[in-house]
């Protein structure tokens, strides 16, 4: 689903899917309580940085050494946030898409202070990549980092087209089935494994990021597993924007954020009512011609424009 770049707070995530009849299906989330979300058990986080040749100039330098290191600025902020949700207080930072596009290099583990001052200048032992293959990084997070962890998050920065989308999809569908079995069997909490794709630069294939985000839509896993979310770095103008992208989709339907609530169309007509409590994540359909909606609660209203997604 197309995503609203900067939802009006306290909404954290708003996705819009225009329908053939002119209506629009909307899925919206409020920001979850991150401490409750992560829990008190073992939690781990990974920040994976694209190191393909196409992104090299975004690591700064240039002929006169004056080009800004855009990746470093984004990575320092994301790393600091991720270190706070890891039980060890550290985040693993890695480079991916090395060599022929499939190699990984670990930069190390960094605490919040270390992330804020980390020199993010690119790979040290392997060559900048000639391709962009994501599956090795997904497998590393799922098969290595997640082992023994009760809550795992991987944030992946990319600048362009991911070449192995089909292989990633095949692997992730099986991974999703395994996660669902673990949740159903009581050995894993729901929404305790999440991958977030962050697009940087001007050549990002936004449509591809949306396909990853919607990977399980239309499958038997659609209501049970939401493996991916995505965002665009240019839209992340402050820390709240970053938090919304990284954690916004992890809100669930079981969490009640207001005693009652309803959704109104632009004319003020009620299109959905939550008399037993407004959930933190909710879905509704806006009628044809609607370009906004209002969440009405006893605490106040939130008006959200969706024109950019139509």
Image: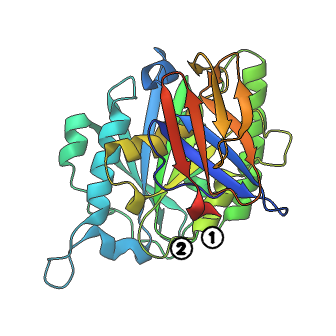
| Residue 14: image tag | none
For the question of whether residue 108 can be seen, the reply is: no
Question: Closest to the observer: 306 or 32?
Answer: 306
Give the residue number, with chain letter if any, for mark 2. 131
Note whether 82 is above or below 275 in the view shown: below
For the question of whether residue 302 can be seen, the reply is: yes
* The C terminus lies in quadrant: bottom right
Note whether 103 is above or below 81 in the view shown: below
Disc 1 and disc 2 in contact, CB within 8 angstroms: yes
- Classify residue 85 by image quadrant: top left
* The N terminus lies in quadrant: bottom right
In this view, the residue farthest toward the bottom is 63
Instruction: Measuring from the top left, give residue 174's x and y in whole percent.
Output: 77, 43
At x 31%, y 49%, the residue is: 238
Give the residue number, with chain letter if any, for mark 1. 163
Instruction: Measuring from the top left, give residue 195's x and y in whole percent.
Output: 56, 44
Question: Closest to the observer: 284 or 174?
Answer: 284
At x 36%, y 42%, the residue is: 240
Note whether 28 is above or below 136 in the view shown: above
Instruction: Measuring from the top left, give residue 86's x and y in whole percent.
Output: 40, 28
Question: Closest to the observer: 265 or 23?
Answer: 265
Question: Closest to the observer: 273 or 68?
Answer: 273
Mark before the other along the chain sequence, 1 or 2: 2
**Crowding at mark 1 (Cα within 10 Å: few <14, some 14-19, many 20+):** some
At x 35%, y 46%, the residue is: 78
Q: CA–CA distance between discs 1 and 2?
A: 7 Å
- Classify residue 3 by image quadrant: bottom right
At x 60%, y 20%, the residue is: 255
């Amino acid at each position: 689903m197309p995503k609203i770049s900067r939802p009006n707070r306290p909404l954290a995530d708003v996705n819009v899917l225009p329908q053939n009849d002119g209506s629009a299906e909307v899925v919206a989330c409020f920001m979850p309580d991150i401490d409750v979300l992560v829990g008190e058990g073992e939690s781990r986080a990974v920040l994976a940085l694209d190191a393909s040749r196409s992104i090299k100039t975004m690591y700064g330098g240039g002929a006169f050494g004056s080009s800004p290191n855009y990746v470093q600025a984004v990575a320092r902020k994301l790393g600091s946030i991720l270190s706070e949700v890891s039980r060890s207080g550290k985040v693993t930072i890695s480079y991916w898409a090395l060599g022929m596009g499939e190699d990984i290099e670990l930069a190390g583990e960094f605490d919040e202070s270390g992330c804020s001052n980390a020199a993010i200048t690119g790979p040290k032992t392997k060559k900048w990549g000639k391709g962009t293959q994501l599956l090795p990084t997904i497998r590393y997070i799922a098969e290595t980092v997640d082992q023994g962890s009760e809550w795992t998050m991987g944030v992946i920065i990319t600048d362009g087209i991911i070449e192995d989308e089909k292989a990633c999809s095949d692997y992730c569908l099986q991974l999703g089935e395994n996660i669902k079995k673990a949740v159903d069997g009581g050995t894993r909490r729901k929404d305790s494994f999440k991958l977030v794709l962050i697009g940087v630069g001007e050549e990002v294939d936004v449509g591809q990021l949306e396909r990853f985000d919607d990977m399980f839509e239309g499958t038997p896993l659609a209501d049970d597993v939401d493996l991916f979310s995505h965002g665009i770095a240019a839209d992340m103008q402050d820390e709240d924007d970053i938090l919304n992208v990284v954690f916004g989709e992890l809100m669930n339907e079981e969490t009640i954020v207001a005693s009652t609530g309803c959704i109104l169309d632009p004319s003020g007509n009620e299109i959905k009512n939550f008399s037993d409590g407004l959930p933190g994540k909710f879905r509704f359909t806006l009628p044809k011609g609607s370009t906004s909606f209002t969440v009405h609660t006893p605490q106040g209203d939130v008006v959200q424009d969706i024109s950019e997604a139509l």
